[in-house]
């Protein structure tokens, strides 16, 4: 067995043992947090950082320059009232949701081809095109998402967002406009800004920090 294969086996074993609490992680999320258990569909996923300290970034996120437009650097604030969050905050939302808080939904706004490469555990995929009339999304399908996924209510043509869920949205990162597009469309529909959270770093930062990814949930 060559050295590379042995390293892969040992790293996988270490990750598995750490997830079971049988191995002391050397690369924690914070000084006090080793990992976070997240419900991903029917499965429990232990989100932690890659324990291989020689691990490098996923090549899909290694590019420093992408053509702008469309891949332009996003501002730190999208709109008044929409909170921009980072990794620890999104982990807190994922933990709450996994513990049974049904008022939260974490949304990967990317197109399915990107999501298939790996997503944040606990997230569901609602592509940015699904809420964009300019990309062919019709009022009926948008309404179904608002009611079935976000818990909004349609009252004779008017939307009631009083019991709507808190949406935690992300895409590929600070150069990606897919979740910002979703957010701006939702605000246009009247969705309360204080019920929208934006993880600006997205998959770019998630991958840079070596955090666990998962295959998309099949709904």
Image: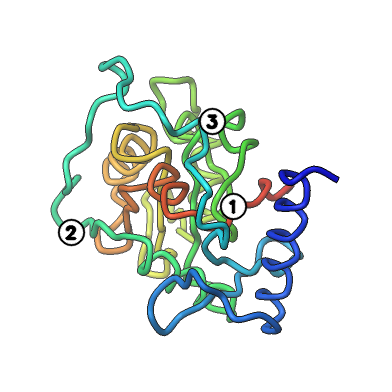
Report the front residue among 56 and 41: 56
Nearer to us of marks 2 and 1 is 1
Task: Residue 186: name its quadrant.
Answer: top left
Question: How far apart are the alpha carbons under marks 2 and 3?
Answer: 26 Å
Label 3: how many residues lie within 10 Å, few (<14), some (14-19) or many (20+)?
A: some
Mark whose residue sits in front, 2 or 3? 3
Q: Looking at this view, is 191 or 208 the one in front?
A: 208
Side (left or right) of 38 relative to 211 = right
Q: Residue at x 54, y 36 (%)?
A: 140
Placement of 146 over or under 41, stated as above or below: above
- Which dot marks residue 164? none
Q: Mark 3 sits on what residue?
A: 111
Q: Secondary structure at mark 2?
A: loop
Classify 10 Å Cα crowding around label 2: few (below 14), some (14-19), many (20 and above): few
How far apart marks 1 and 3 lie (CA) works out to 16 Å
Residue lying at the far front of the rendered structure: 2
> Relative to residue 1, is residue 135 depicted above or below?
above
Q: Quadrant of residue 13?
A: bottom right
Residue 81's disc is 2
Label 3 residue SS: loop
Q: Where is mark 1, residue-wise?
A: 213
């Amino acid at each position: 067995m060559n050295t590379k294969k042995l390293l892969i086996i040992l790293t996988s074993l270490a990750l598995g043992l750490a997830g079971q609490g049988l191995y002391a992680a050397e690369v924690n999320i914070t000084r006090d947090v080793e990992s976070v258990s997240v419900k991903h569909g029917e499965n429990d996923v232990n989100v932690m950082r890659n324990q291989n300290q020689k691990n490098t970034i996923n090549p899909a996120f290694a590019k420093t320059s992408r053509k702008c437009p469309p891949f332009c650097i996003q501002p730190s604030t999208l709109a008044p009232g929409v909170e921009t969050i980072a990794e620890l905050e999104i982990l807190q939302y994922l933990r709450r949701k996994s513990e049974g808080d049904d008022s939260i939904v974490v949304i990967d706004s990317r197109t399915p081809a990107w999501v298939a490469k790996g997503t944040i555990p606990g997230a569901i995929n609602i592509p940015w095109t699904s809420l964009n009339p300019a990309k062919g999304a019709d009022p009926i399908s948008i309404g179904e998402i608002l009611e079935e996924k976000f818990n909004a209510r349609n009252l004779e043509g008017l939307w009631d967002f009083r019991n709507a869920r808190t949406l935690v949205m992300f895409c590929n990162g600070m150069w990606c406009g897919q979740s910002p597009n979703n957010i701006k469309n939702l605000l246009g529909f009247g969705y309360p800004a204080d019920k929208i959270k934006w993880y600006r770093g997205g998959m770019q930062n998630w991958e840079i920090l070596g955090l666990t990814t998962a295959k998309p949930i099949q709904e």
